Image (cartoon, helix red, strand yellow):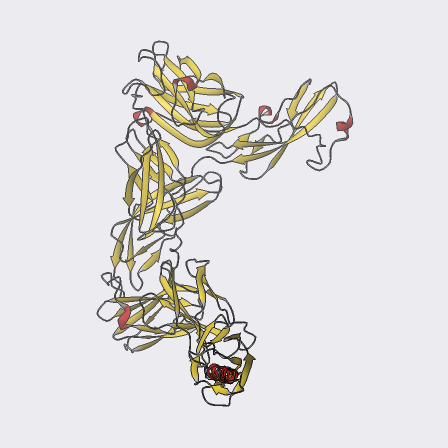
């Protein structure tokens, strides 16, 4: 009996000891991640449940958040950047209730994530980010966005939709590094900043056009090119047989002589614009030119008459026994042509001259012995003589050259490049080689050209009239006319008794389509077809300009050239001319003398140029030639910038102000005789873009700063 009583006492004591371990929760903590609150505490022995109570840190009353048997509780809610406190109420097995101490916590204001810059251009970019809380169902949070040029002081706020995830920037400066900053905008405090950088692209720097040949000798090439103005160019050249380019840095002139070359050698030439430091354009297309290999003595005899496929050229003895004609002469693969040739000077039975004709059929810019298409023939008089040759069917189509060589018979074997000093003459001409045209037959009535087919086309006949669909012919270089021949039109008519052209056989207006009817008759039956002819002018215009001109600067530092006073009667036999200048303008700070090319171009693209020497005389007032090009702009201020319509320039001792666009054109000028410290600038009449404000002081210094017009 005593043992039984002792057992009950021990059981009761052990239960009291166990119940005695239940008490307040400890090690309370709070975490917040991706919108979820995590409350946790240490597990309490013999606890039957936990109550989680929360209130604002301002003490607005406790609220029961949950009752749970776990010591961890996850829930959304709360305000980002808001301060709170919570405690845990523990219920024990014996019914006792124990409250923990109060634990304060603050929900953070998280940073936006994944900053990314895309679509970067010269003047803009797209900023992107991830805001996890922009669509929060309880309390959505927006962002604040700002930017600044790298290294500058204050941030520039951007008017961004706070709940967006991207922003498109504009009106930035080319080749400039910017940093942008984004914060989450929370009620009580903002998130830490997230900063990213990007650099806008270089200013646009278009490539020049492919170089063209201005002149050449045995050891040099003088090339020119068309390009927007720039301070310098990078020209490269190399022999077609090597891989290494040789570079030449030039000034702003668009013509360059390449010296020290090998005779009779072809060279690749290309050119790039140097727009600014570390901003060079792509190279132009490559042009290929060949130095001359001819230095002959043509004092005794020379080529005086050349006629091929409607093109005629007459000349005297050319220097060094060489002439190059750049007029385009059309030929067709596989066709046979008659070259009418005559010499001048002492050509007779005792002084015969061999004749050979070479075609650069593979267009490798070298006349090879295997490319001889005629020869060897000879001239024994100064009368016209016909030589027939065929364009090889295997020749490449496109633009190439034809070379005619005459060499006195006692001067050795005739070659494309005769021995220097030999008695002879060489002329080169430019051919345009086309593939054979497909044969097409057109049956039309004479009074309805190009409209209604002749009813005779339905009659079965044993003969046919075939006209070439379209034909390009080339003018005489002197009278701008062309005498049409049946051979120009006929494309293989057969089985006829007679064939003739109707209407006028002379074209007088280059560039205007001209329709010619060819009639083919047999046994009183007549078939007709029509050809559309277009006449081209291939003779370069003549550019006649002044040799020297004085340009005086009075109240500006930029003068644009025009034909008035510079073009002294340039002319073309057949078409109107357009006149342009390279460079297009002069500045008072340009070196004197300045050399300007006046170029005249006819409606067919034939071009010629003349060189003008410009003497620059500076008598400007307020824009002195020795004004410093650039000064630090810290002593002048312009606001607002960017500008919508008007802005104010603030500075000391400002005598005059100009607004200049990005290519140097003066938009407006104004004097400030009273040297007022504030000057109102009018941008209301200019287009959006980047401009430069140039402020000139009474001491002759120039201050320049950029302004962006919205």
User: What x and y, as percent, mark residue 400?
Assistant: 44, 29
Question: Could you tell me which residue is drawn at 29 percent across and 63 percent down?
Answer: 554
The C terminus sits in image quarter: bottom left
Q: Residue at x 41, y 30 (%)?
A: 325
Residue 561 higher or lower than 689, as above or below: above
Q: Position of residue 197 (x, y in %)?
A: 38, 62
In the rendered image, the residue lying farthest to the bottom is 60
The answer to whether one can see residue 156 in this image is: yes
Looking at the image, residue 60 sits to the left or right of residue 232; the answer is: right
Side of 243 where 514 appears, left or right: right
Tell whether 250 sits left or right of 108.
left
Q: Residue furthest front?
A: 1
Q: Give the camera-side residue of 697 and 208.
A: 208
Above or below, 220 against 188 in this view is above
Q: Compare residues 31 and 626 and report the one nearer the observer.
A: 31
Q: Nearer the viewer, residue 446 or 705?
A: 705
Counting from the top left corner in percent of width and height, residue 571 is at 42, 42
The image quarter containing residue 522 is top right
């Amino acid at each position: 009996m005593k043992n039984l009583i002792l057992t009950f006492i021990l059981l009761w004591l052990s239960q009291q000891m166990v119940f005695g371990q239940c008490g307040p929760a400890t090690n309370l903590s709070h975490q917040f991640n991706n919108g979820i609150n995590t409350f946790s505490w240490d597990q309490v022995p013999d606890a039957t449940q936990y109550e989680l109570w929360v209130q604002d840190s301002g003490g607005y009353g406790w609220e029961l958040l949950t009752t749970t048997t776990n010591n961890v509780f996850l829930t959304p809610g709360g305000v980002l950047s808001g301060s709170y406190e919570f405690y845990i109420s523990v219920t024990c097995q014996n019914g006792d209730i124990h409250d923990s101490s109060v634990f304060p916590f603050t929900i953070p204001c998280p940073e936006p994530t994944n900053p990314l810059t895309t679509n970067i251009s010269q003047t803009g970019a797209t900023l992107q980010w991830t805001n996890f809380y922009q669509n929060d169902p309880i309390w959505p949070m927006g962002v604040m966005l700002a930017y600044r040029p790298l290294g500058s002081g204050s941030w520039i706020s951007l008017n961004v939709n706070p709940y967006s995830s991207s922003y498109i920037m504009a009106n930035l400066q080319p080749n400039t590094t910017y940093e942008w900053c984004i914060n989450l905008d929370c009620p009580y405090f903002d998130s830490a900043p997230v900063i990213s950088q990007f650099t806008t692209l270089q200013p646009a720097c278009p490539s020049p056009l492919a170089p063209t040949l201005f002149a050449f000798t045995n050891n040099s090439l003088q090339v020119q090119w068309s390009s927007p103005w720039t301070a310098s160019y990078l020209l490269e050249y190399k022999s077609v047989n090597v891989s290494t380019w040789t570079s030449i840095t030039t000034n702003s002139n668009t013509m360059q002589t390449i010296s020290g070359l090998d005779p009779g050698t072809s060279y690749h030439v290309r050119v790039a614009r140097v727009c600014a430091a570390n901003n060079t354009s792509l190279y132009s297309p490559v042009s290929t030119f060949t130095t001359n290999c001819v230095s002959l003595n043509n004092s005794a005899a020379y080529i005086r008459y050349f006629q091929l496929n409607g093109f005629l050229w007459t000349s005297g003895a050319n220097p060094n026994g060489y002439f190059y004609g750049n007029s385009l002469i059309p030929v067709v693969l596989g066709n046979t042509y008659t070259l009418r040739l005559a010499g001048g000077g002492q050509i007779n039975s005792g002084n015969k001259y061999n004749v050979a004709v070479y075609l650069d059929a593979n267009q490798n810019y070298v006349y090879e012995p295997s490319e001889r298409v005629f020869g060897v023939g000879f001239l024994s008089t100064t009368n016209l003589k016909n030589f027939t040759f065929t364009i090889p069917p295997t020749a490449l189509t496109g633009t190439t050259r034809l070379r005619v060589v005459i060499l006195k018979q006692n001067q050795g074997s005739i070659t494309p490049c005769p021995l220097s000093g030999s008695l002879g003459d060489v002329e080169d001409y430019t051919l345009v080689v086309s593939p054979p045209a497909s044969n097409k037959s057109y049956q039309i009535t004479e009074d309805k050209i190009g409209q209604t087919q002749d009813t005779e086309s339905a009659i079965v006949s044993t003969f046919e009239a075939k006209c070439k669909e379209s034909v390009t012919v080339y003018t005489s270089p002197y009278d701008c006319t062309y005498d049409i021949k049946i051979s120009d039109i006929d494309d293989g008519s057969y089985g006829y008794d007679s064939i003739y052209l109707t209407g006028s056989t002379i074209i007088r207006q280059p560039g205007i389509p001209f329709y010619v009817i060819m009639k083919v008759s047999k046994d009183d039956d007549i078939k007709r077809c029509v050809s559309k002819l277009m006449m081209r002018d291939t003779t370069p215009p003549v550019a006649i300009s002044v040799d020297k001109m004085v340009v005086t600067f009075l109240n500006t530092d930029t003068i644009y050239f025009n034909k008035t006073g510079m073009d002294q009667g340039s002319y073309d036999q057949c078409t109107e001319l357009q006149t342009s200048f390279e460079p297009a303008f002069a500045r008072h700070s340009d070196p004197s003398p300045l050399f300007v090319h006046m170029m005249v171009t006819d409606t067919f693209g034939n071009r010629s140029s003349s060189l003008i020497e410009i003497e620059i005389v500076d008598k400007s007032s307020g824009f002195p030639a020795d004004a410093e090009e650039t000064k630090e702009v810290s002593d002048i201020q312009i606001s607002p910038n960017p500008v919508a319509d008007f802005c104010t320039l603030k500075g000391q001792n400002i005598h005059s102000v100009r607004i200049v666009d990005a290519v140097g054109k003066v938009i407006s000028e104004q004097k400030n005789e009273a040297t007022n410290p504030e000057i109102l600038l009018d941008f209301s009449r200019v287009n959006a873009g980047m401009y430069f404000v140039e402020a000139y002081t009474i001491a002759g210094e120039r201050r320049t700063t950029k302004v962006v017009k919205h």
